[in-house]
Amino acid sequence: MTPVALLFLVISIVVVWGGLVASILHLRAHPADDGADPGVDVTGEAGQPGQPGVDGTATRP
Amino acid sequence: MSKTAPTQPSPRAREQWSGQRGFILAAIGSAVGLGNIWRFPGVAYENGGGAFLVPYLVALLTAGIPVLLLDYSIGHRFRGSAPAALRRLAGRGGETLGWFQVAISFAIILYYTVIIAWSASYLVFSVTQAWGDDTQAFLYGEYLQLADAPGVSADVVPSVLIPLLLVWVVVLAILALGVQKGLERANLVFLPVLVVLFVTLVVRALFLDGAVDGLNAFFTPDWSALADPGVWVSAYGQIFFSLSIAFGIMITYSSYLRRRSNLTSTGLVVGFANSSFEILAGIGVFAALGFMAAQSGTTVAELEGIAGVSLAFIAFPQIISMMPGGPIFGVLFFGSLTLAGLTSLLSILQVVSAAFQEKFGLTARQGALRIGAVAALLSVALFSTRTALYVLDTVDKYVNEVGVLTSAVLTAVVATWVVRRLPELQAHLNAVSSLRVGTWWRVLIGLVVPVVLGYILVSGAVTLIQDGYEGYPRWFTNGFGWGVVVLLPIAAVALTSLRWRHDVDGFTPDTLPGVAARRSRTEARR
């Protein structure tokens, strides 16, 4: 490959795939607390949810 | 007028993903579609090569991910399909916008299915290289039996009809199983298989003679392109059409997320995953095109038909026939195309199914089968005949470049300027996410997105009005292009006027500090 094409191949991979890896690492470091809200969520039509990130259990039937 | 008085709360629990991972896989599966494989490489090559990376990333960060987060915030906060969530955001007009998005999805489903059917057929053809020496003649003459001129044919092509029906059976069966057992499990299998197939294909392509020439052509930057406004428009267009945003998919998908979900980080993962696949596709496709040019004694610059249907069903079969181990490469390529299409199709179908489920109190199975039956019938009637390619080409062009762009601009304008609830959506994102969005996000949604996408919409529409499309007769583009575009809002208004089976307005969104008063004022004004 020509040096300039190779450079842009590397930049593309580093920036875009690097962005993906960084996003995944950040998400893994800050996971949502799925365990707090294991049940079904009835809020689709008539639920009265609580505050986000605080009381997901308020939405259980 | 919409009547909700005699309705009652839903007796059914709302479906949800098993966790964030299931949602992310499904959202990536939705975003990674045919456009990643057959649109991005050609667009990047024709708009500056390596230099295209600059406008592409700018578009991703200033429009793609911000609109993705807008969709997430609406779906997650108002926990409904597009009509329900947008009604809860912006009242009756919002619901009509939601049904407009559903109508767009419905139109796209009809032809998207047949492309997957073609791809599945070519997966089988790859094994014996059934296309012979003249891949173009095989596609148009033997396989599609394409009519000589655009029109409406009733001549069904059995070789297209059979795989089309099979695709419908598969996707409706998955959809009928619901969100967790159907969509999530399908993506859990399809997406990893797609990645493995496609990475294998790209690695193989890199070792072909001439691959380096293809990569040189693809990555060598043309800096003068950055001064061309058309290149920037192409970058925004590519990002916008590639991410599955603004026609209900991400609103619907995020509405099944649990309340404690990290929305902004998830959006970044999905946005960058989609672009990562596009870069991978660029490498694979241009390595293969470099091989094709070398075998043909020409250069990549002189190749024609390096995007869309021509790339997939004419150029790639040629490449497959030229290379050692071609059948394996063919199975990898058409397997990837089929799976990428399937995961995207499922998400578009869910937009329609979820909307009808909620409005008319249907189960997932009822929604899938009833909507699916109607869609399958129309799909077969329009796209298994000898004029399918003309109709597909026209509907796709007009629905995307007029319908989807209109939907995006309207959603941004309504949220920002009409109901002025962007601060509430921002507060919602920040309440559940680890990465906070600031005022910049409101500026991007309220100003940059409407201006840039509005420009693309208007300039594209003016061109279509003045020049028509592809030299097709005016009666044809007026019927299948503008005609379909006009039908979308008519269907939206009609569906809005029907009664909700359950109380859609009894929903109360999560309380957010400093937002309740603002919301009350908005409602009082309405």
Image (tube, rainbow, N blue to C red):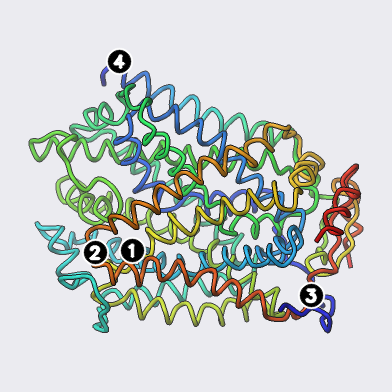
Secondary structure beneath dot 1 equals helix
Q: Chain of mark 4?
A: A
- Which is nearer the eye, B370 or B56? B56
Total residue callouts:
4
Amino acid bearing label 4: Pro
Amino acid bearing label 2: Tyr
- Which is nearer the eye, B80 or B201? B80
Circle 1 or circle 2, nearest the eye:
2
Q: Residues within 10 Å of mark 3 (few under 14, many from 20)?
A: some
What residue sits right under mark 3 in the picture? Answer: B12
Q: Point out residue B484 in the picture as x, y percentages from the top left corner.
A: 43, 70
Q: CA distance from mark 4 to mark 2?
A: 44 Å
CB contact under 8 Å: marks 1 and 2? yes
Secondary structure beneath dot 4 equals helix
Q: CA distance from mark 1 to mark 4?
A: 42 Å
Q: Residues within 10 Å of mark 1 (few under 14, many from 20)?
A: many
- The reply to the same-chain question for discs 1 and 4 is no
Upstream in sequence: badge 1 or badge 3:
3
Upstream in sequence: badge 1 or badge 2:
1
- The reply to the same-chain question for discs 4 and 2 is no
What residue sits right under mark 2 in the picture? Answer: B472
Secondary structure beneath dot 3 equals loop
Q: Residues within 10 Å of mark 2 (few under 14, many from 20)?
A: some
Q: Point out residue B123 in the picture as x, y percentages from the top left corner.
A: 30, 61
What residue sits right under mark 1 in the picture? Answer: B394
Amino acid bearing label 1: Thr
Q: Chain of mark 1?
A: B
The residue lying at 59 percent from left, 50 percent from top is B25
Q: CA distance from mark 1 to mark 3?
A: 40 Å
- The reply to the same-chain question for discs 3 and 2 is yes
What residue sits right under mark 4 in the picture? Answer: A3
